[in-house]
Amino acid sequence: MERVELHSRFRQSSMMQEVVAKCFAAIRLAIENEKIPGAVLGLIDKNGARAIEFGGLALKVGALRAMARDTVFDLASLTKVIFTTNAIMSLVAKRQIALDDPLSKFIPDIRQYDLSAPERQLTIEQCLTHQTFLPAVEPIYSFGLDPTTMRAYILQKQWQHGAFAYSDINFMLLGIVLERVLGAPLNEQTTPRGTTFAPSPEHCAATEYCTWRNRLICGEVHDENAFAFGGASGHAGLFGTVDAVLDFAYDLLNHKLLPPEHTSQLFVRKSAQRALGWEIKYDNWTGGQNCSQNTIGHTGFTGTGLWIDPEREIAWTLLTNRVHPTRHFESGIMALRREVGEAIIGAYDANYR
């Protein structure tokens, strides 16, 4: 019996490799047209069968470095879901926090000079689902580089109210919640297997030439605010390979990260576009339109992305270094993500349904 299962899985992996190789065509064209330097595409199912394809360059200036399966990527905002959301939900599962708890329960010094400040009443769930008045981003790094001062600034600032928006600030605050509850800075906390806040630069895909730091960024976090926070924040700072990202998706699909009842909460729509931490399928979203309605996904500014379809019990990741050597260029990454997502589901269904 065991030999039959192994043979079946080998056959499935071979078929999946054909699917991924076929879907890599659009990515290869983007590389040839110099829209992106390089990319890695990976697909995994709930049984652990996986397929990976890669091409292009991880470093295109100076000493050229080819993209490879073991290339380490700055996952950027995938940090929000792979690390922060997962860590928050783990604490919810352990009943150390609740989704309706206000931030001030764990950060009593937030807006400490005005105990009626609205920032104090923002809840864990509101931050996870980006249902707050906080801005999308703020150049906090421009005030200095001392991580303690940076945290004090974000906690004491009277934020201007705005419409609900996807906000890095929400997750920077959730990162501080994790530090307070667990009693350790984020870069000392346990990350999902295969991921890290401190990669080896020689294995990393380069990101941007940073005019603020006056150097090409490779092996250190691209996001300026995360760098100012000490290299790790609730919104950015995590690094990993394609296999690390696929391992996370596999563990999530198999309830190895959270109990089933808490895993299922991640696939519940909380607003038109948001679940807890994740985006959930909507018109014209990055995962394409062929996936099931409760498919969740997230992207990262550096060119990364992960999508999980619970109905088909599969996940795919597209990892690129599209900001290398500069972000000030139209890479076409949004359209490429949609094209790849639709191709993955279309080819998967043709072979497995």
Image (spheres, rainbow, N blue to C red):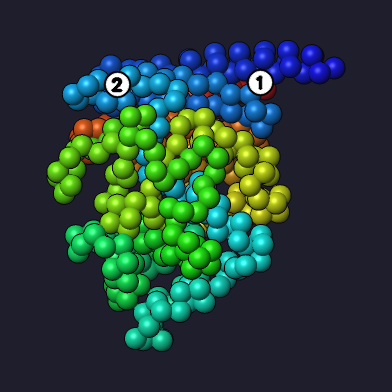
Which residue shows up at 33% across the image and 55% down it? 230
**173 versus 306 height, above or below:** below
Name the amino acid, label 1: Tyr
Residue 247 lies, in percent from the top left, at 57, 35
Circle 2 residues within 10 Å: few <14, some 14–19, many ≥20: some
Circle 1 residues within 10 Å: few <14, some 14–19, many ≥20: few
Q: Nearer the viewer, residue 35 or 271?
A: 35
Mark 1 or mark 2: whose residue is earlier in sequence: 2
**27 versus 89 height, above or below:** above
Residue 221 lies, in percent from the top left, at 32, 45
Residue 65's label in the rendered image is 2
If the image is split into quadrants, where does the N terminus sit? top right
Say whether residue 191 is left or right of residue 229: right
Residue 2's label in the rendered image is none
Residue 285 lies, in percent from the top left, at 44, 41
Mark 1 — residue?
A: 352
Q: CA distance from mark 1 to mark 2?
A: 36 Å
Name the amino acid, label 2: Arg
If the image is split into quadrants, where does the C terminus sit? top right
